[in-house]
Image (cartoon, helix red, strand yellow):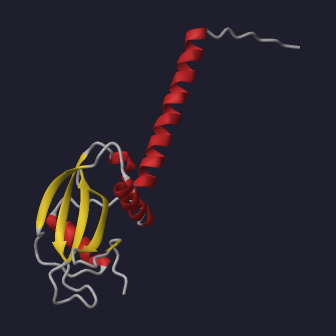
Amino acid sequence: MFIHTVKIRKPKVWLTVILVIIFAAMTAVFIFGLKNRGSTRELGSETKRQAFLKEMGWQVPDSFESVKTVLIPKEWEEVYLNYNKLQKQQGFDLTAYKGMQVQVYTYKVLNYPQHEDEDCIFCHLMISDGQLIGGDVCSTALDGFMQGLRFNS
């Protein structure tokens, strides 16, 4: 019988363990990063926002009506809780943006059913670092409404 003894130094073992952990962490970040990338929309330019709105089924003027910087509060009252429910129904979640400033682009909607001749239907796109993080289509009329971004005919 042949017995061979190998002496492994502790620093080499620890270095190997650390390298394996770093490799596993980098792989997880890469995989989850690619997975989450598909759910975000880069809308940092007017051309991309216009294409997105058309894809959602909306006809809007060639440029936004207004753009405002809005602070999403850290503490939410019922209004923001309800608004975030609408966002979650669309696949967004504003929770990660609490306490942050975002840009809200407002567009006049020209083709909302039964409101085509009115100036009270608007679409809001919430953008953070060029990424779409939420939005809505709403009526500012007295009997107004709010819905998700997709056209519902």
**Position of 32 compared to 8: left or right?**
left
In front here: 113 or 19? 113
- Tell me the residue at 52%/22% (across/down): 18
Count how many numbered circles sit on residues in the image.
0
| Residue 122 visible in the current orientation | yes
In front here: 132 or 3? 132
User: What is the quadrant of residue 119 in the picture?
Assistant: bottom left
- Tell me the residue at 25%/80% (across/down): 58
How far from the left and from the top, in percent, is residue 82?
Answer: 40, 60
How far from the left and from the top, in percent, is residue 106?
Answer: 17, 67
**Position of 56 compared to 18: left or right?**
left
Position of residue 106 relative to residue 37, above or below, is: below
How far from the left and from the top, in percent, is residue 47?
Answer: 16, 68
| Residue 38 visible in the current orientation | no
Q: Quadrant of the C terminus?
A: bottom left
Q: Residue furthest right?
A: 1
In front here: 86 or 39? 86
- Tell me the residue at 70%/11% (across/down): 6
How far from the left and from the top, in percent, is residue 89?
Answer: 44, 66
Q: Quadrant of the N terminus?
A: top right
- Tell me the residue at 22%/78% (across/down): 141
